[in-house]
Image (spheres, helix red, strand yellow):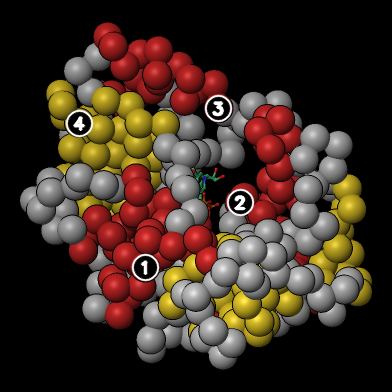
Amino acid sequence: MKAVVQRRYGSAVLGELDVPVPGQGEVLLEVRAAGVDMGTWHLLTGKPYLIRVIGFGFRGPKSPVPGRDVSGVVAAVGPGVTEFAPGDEVFGTCGGSFAEYAVAPVARLARKPAGISFAEAAAVPISGGTALQGLRGVQAGQRVLVLGAGGGVGSYGVQIAKALGAHVTGVCSTSKVELVRSLGADEVVDYTVADFTGTYDLILSCGGERPLSRLRRASTPRGRIVLVGAETGGSVTGGFERSLASVALNPFVSQKFVPLMSTERADVFDELRVLIEAGRIKPPVDRTFPLSEALDAIDYVYTRRSRGKVVVTI
Ligand SMILES: NC(=O)c1ccc[n+]([C@@H]2O[C@H](COP(=O)([O-])OP(=O)(O)OC[C@H]3O[C@@H](n4cnc5c(N)ncnc54)[C@H](OP(=O)(O)O)[C@@H]3O)[C@@H](O)[C@H]2O)c1
């Protein structure tokens, strides 16, 4: 099969690999599309170095193929799989979706939402799942601030917060203002022109590493500040120290910092499927790239040109 092959961190090429064989609780997917996000860049480069010690491979990547978000058709099932059968259309995450075939555990797959394309489905799992988990507990009428609202996680954050009945303010740069408005944000702040004001019940911080003190000032006294991520940290910890600092700060402040570590699970993807089929959220696909240009797709996301999501189609 054709695949993007990555034997060491920092370099990958289009090559040929054997079709993988599904093991216990896994299925073989004929990949139709693979989502791209900042995590794809992290696993390609091995940066920040922290990811190498938390299980993705110390000297080189554990998976020889990059890409986690996936949509496709089940081609074969491994031992013990009863949830899916060959021919089923699914989406979720796997290890190595930048390839014609990939093996995925059923614990990280759900039925593909009806009425959307494979490319749109592949744009959902990690970004949509992260936003959904970050917004747990939001009540109708609450005020939600989404930082990085024009990016992968933030663009779902805006839509899911609106679906929950919140009043949503999205913060992004000029080129993403129209997108964030179209996603349903009640207010859009272009941070290159002015900074956000006001106080919020929940802040979903997905871009721009604002100091914790700045986030606290923008939070209601009992508000929650969910730290999703930012790309402003160094190459060792990638800003993870901000999450650690927030945990140390929690006992002394009335607001609650939540350093988010999202999980990739079938039940989360199924919740997203229901929201999509009900028309409450729509995968915001900016651009698709063919497999032969997968590295350009990652660069497009890394250089922050992408509005919403980017997908590699196979
Ligand atoms: N904790 C977890 O489980 C988890 C899961 C997924 C992702 N992440 C991390 O979360 C972060 C966001 O992921 P993503 O996939 O959404 O990345 P993304 O698509 O690159 O989106 C980040 C957005 O932040 C915007 N931004 C940058 N500086 C900003 C500022 N000062 N104010 C407001 N917005 C700003 C960027 O564009 P503009 O500057 O042009 O607006 C970009 O649209 C990444 O660091 C990723 O690694 C964490």
* Residue that mark 3 sits on: 240
Instruction: Find residue 270 and name its label.
Output: 1
Task: Residue at 78% x, 48% y: name it.
Answer: 62
Q: Is residue 1 visible?
A: yes
Q: Earlier in the sequence, mark 4 or mark 1?
A: 4
Residue type (three-letter) at the residue carrying disc 3: Phe
Give the spatial CA distance, label 2 vs label 4.
Answer: 27 Å
Q: Nearer the viewer, mark 1 or mark 2?
A: 1
* Residue that mark 2 sits on: 38
Q: Label 4 neighbourhood size at 10 Å, few (<14), some (14-19), many (20+)? A: many
Question: Is the CB of mark 2 within 8 Å of ligand 1?
Answer: yes
Give the spatial CA distance, label 4 vs label 1.
Answer: 28 Å
Q: Earlier in the sequence, mark 2 or mark 4?
A: 2
User: In which quadrant of the rendered image does the C terminus lie?
Assistant: bottom right
Residue type (three-letter) at the residue carrying disc 2: Met
Q: Earlier in the sequence, mark 4 or mark 3?
A: 4
* Residue that mark 4 sits on: 223
Q: Which secondary structure, mark 4?
A: strand
Q: Label 3 neighbourhood size at 10 Å, few (<14), some (14-19), many (20+)? A: some
Q: Earlier in the sequence, mark 1 or mark 2?
A: 2
Q: Which secondary structure, mark 3?
A: helix
Q: Label 2 neighbourhood size at 10 Å, few (<14), some (14-19), many (20+)? A: many
